[in-house]
Image: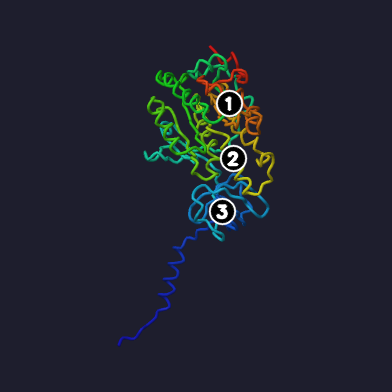
Amino acid sequence: MAELTISSDEIRGALERYVSSYKPELSREEVGTVTEAGDGIAHVEGLPSTMASELLEFENGTLGVALNLDIRDIGVVILGDYSGIEEGQRVKRTGRVLSVPVGDAFLGRVVNAVGEPVDGLGEIAHEGYRELELQAPSVVSRKSVHEPLHTGIKAIDSMTPIGRGQRQLIIGDRQTGKTTIALDTIINQRQNWETGDPKKQVRCIYVAVGQKASTIAAVKATLEEHGAMEYTTIVAAPASDPAGFKYIAPYAGSAIGQHWMYNGKHVLIVFDDLTKQAEAYRAISLLLRRPPGREAYPGDVFYLHSRLLERCAKLSDELGGGSLTGLPIVETKAGDVSAYIPTNVISITDGQIFLQTDLFNQGVRPAINVGISVSRVGGAAQQ
């Protein structure tokens, strides 16, 4: 049997070669722990440097948005399926704030509240990302509204005209034709789109919040039937989605629209409807243990809508002259326009179209109450 010999020189040489070829890689990562989870909300400890609205990643790859920043505890809204998130799981920072992909490829598509396609037509080739919590254009960046945006409805275009860059509220009880007016306005932009003139063309975004999936499918079918999906993007946060998606969907839609506005294009965005967004935000705030105010809404529910609707603007010529026109929809109960959310949005917008149940039942379509309806832009939006 051969004698086993160990050469110390060979061992030393092998170790030297290993040490010389080893390249250490250092990475710094803040990791926290889930202390409580449920109902689409997670409480996390151990991430003291987290930014407001920063994306956090859970163990299973699900993302969440940091909404409450306390000294020890962070309140996170989970974006996606929260059934697999449990107490004790690790959470890490991403260093990114919540943003959505943007670009012309979104025209004709249906996406969810984070910009992911949900229409089964494959991936969308985006041109970049835009943050959801962007500041609205400043006073210096704006220009007075002076170009008309025709709805195709004579009662509106003659009495309460809408201009490009205006915020015009559509308010009324359920089943009074609010969505119909918004869809008619989108369909009426087809003639401008077919001219091929960028100064006339209007890109449209329809944000559906808290609606039945079948209703959103019916809206898409209506737009396709009239050839309007060619220049329209639908941002869908149906009733089956978690409250977090319903809360951020209007901001995602406005981010997609702002991309076109800052590129000198004209955009029309419909928020259908902001009542359901406010209810989703109320649910999130109560789960995050924020103190409730009037009608159990949190104290910053006015800011929720003001920072959204202030992004609608007509930009100055130096910034390309683009515009973002907003048609927010608010549902009232028993025609009460003096409720909390309706009065908030009325005070933010540049006018309102009030639809009345009595007129609708009498066969007056659209059922516009001309006494309460007003456009604060007025003749400047008529040509």
Label 2 vs 3, first from the N-terminus: 3
The residue carrying mark 1 is: 169
Q: Distance between the residues labelled 2 and 1?
A: 18 Å
Give the quarter of the image for residue 138. top right
Q: Distance between the residues labelled 2 and 3?
A: 18 Å
The percent coordinates of residue 200 (x first, y second) are 46, 19
Give the quarter of the image for residue 1. bottom left
Give the quarter of the image for residue 348. top right
Q: Sort mark 2 into few (<14), some (14-19) or many (20+) by Cα contacts within 10 Å.
A: some
The residue carrying mark 3 is: 38
What element does badge 3 sit on? strand
Q: Residue type at mark 2: give it.
A: Glu
Q: How far apart are marks 3 and 1 (CA)?
A: 35 Å
Residue 333 got which mark?
none
Q: Residue type at mark 3: give it.
A: Gly
Residue placed at 40% from the left, 75% from the top?
10
Q: Sort mark 3 into few (<14), some (14-19) or many (20+) by Cα contacts within 10 Å.
A: some
The percent coordinates of residue 56 (x first, y second) are 55, 50
Left/right of residue 249 with respect to residue 225 in the rendered view: right
The percent coordinates of residue 289 (x first, y second) are 65, 49
The percent coordinates of residue 229 (x first, y second) are 41, 29
Query: Which sits in the foreground, 202 or 239?
Result: 239
Query: Which sits in the foreground, 214 or 94?
Result: 214
Q: Residue type at mark 1: give it.
A: Leu
The residue carrying mark 2 is: 279
Label 2 vs 1, first from the N-terminus: 1
